[in-house]
Image: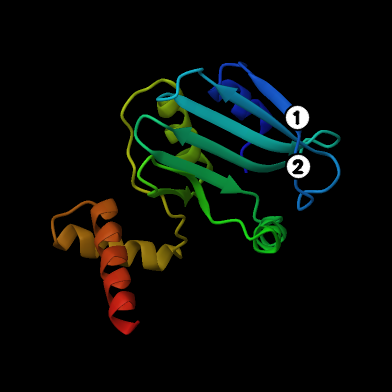
Amino acid sequence: MITLKQFMDICDYRITEASDYGWQCFGPNAYCFDSWNGDQKGHTVSIVFDNKDQTVYQVTAYDYARDRAYRMINPDFKADFDAECKDRDVLDHAWELDDGTPVKYVDLDVEEDFIEKARAIVNDIDYDTRVQVPIDFTDEELLQYMTMAHRLDITFNEFVEEALRSAIEHHKLDL
């Protein structure tokens, strides 16, 4: 999970709002910082953290110009967050467009992915909307897959992306 320091760096230490976090899922010391640029077509980045021990529970980045919302939830507290969402009957989207279309959250698992996207959103520059996925290989598997990618004359990343796309398509067919 990213740190409070990393978050502050993303928003250039510009906090526009701070408050107790209104839900119970993160405990009694949960506090929230928001950094909004003041533009309805701009951005907001937010962090929920423990104001006693600095544990970060959740970070979000809202890109109003592109109608995208990204978040990371600390995996140690995800089940509690999901349970409270269910108890409160809260839909899992960030906001609705004028026509009622929901802008759904994109949940991220890789710190660097969130940091890259949040920085780009704050600086209003284009960014890669693909989601980074952590993958662990043994040394033997890594060598085997790199060799296969070489034989196909593609990069290792392209090879992994194609394998993931194929697995997703197979999964869709099984449903």
Image coordinates for residue 106, horizontal then vertical, percent: 45, 49
Labelled disc at residue 125: none
Which residue is drawn at the image coordinates 44% and 24% (left, top)? 40
Amino acid type indicated by mark 2: Gly
Residue labelled with disc 2: 22
| Residue 45 lies in quadrant | top right
Mark 1 burial class by Cα count in 10 Å: few <14, some 14-19, many 20+: few
Query: 150 or 170, which lies in front?
Result: 170
> Does 62 sit left or right of 160 as displayed?
right
Q: Are marks 2 and 1 in contact (CB under 8 Å)?
A: yes
Image coordinates for residue 78, horizontal then vertical, percent: 66, 57
Numbered-mark total: 2
Q: Is residue 24 visible?
A: yes
132, above or below 144, in the image: above
Q: Secondary structure at mark 2?
A: loop
Image coordinates for residue 8, horizontal then vertical, percent: 62, 23
Which residue is drawn at the image coordinates 63% and 18% (left, top)? 16
Amino acid type indicated by mark 1: Ser
Locate the N terminus by quadrant.
top right
Image coordinates for residue 143, horizontal then vertical, percent: 33, 62
Residue labelled with disc 1: 19
Q: Secondary structure at mark 1?
A: strand
| Residue 124 lies in quadrant | top left
> Does 115 sit left or right of 77 as displayed?
left
Which residue is drawn at the image coordinates 55% and 56% (left, top)? 91
Mark 2 burial class by Cα count in 10 Å: few <14, some 14-19, many 20+: few
Which residue is drawn at the image coordinates 43% and 54% (left, top)? 133
Q: Is residue 109 visible?
A: no
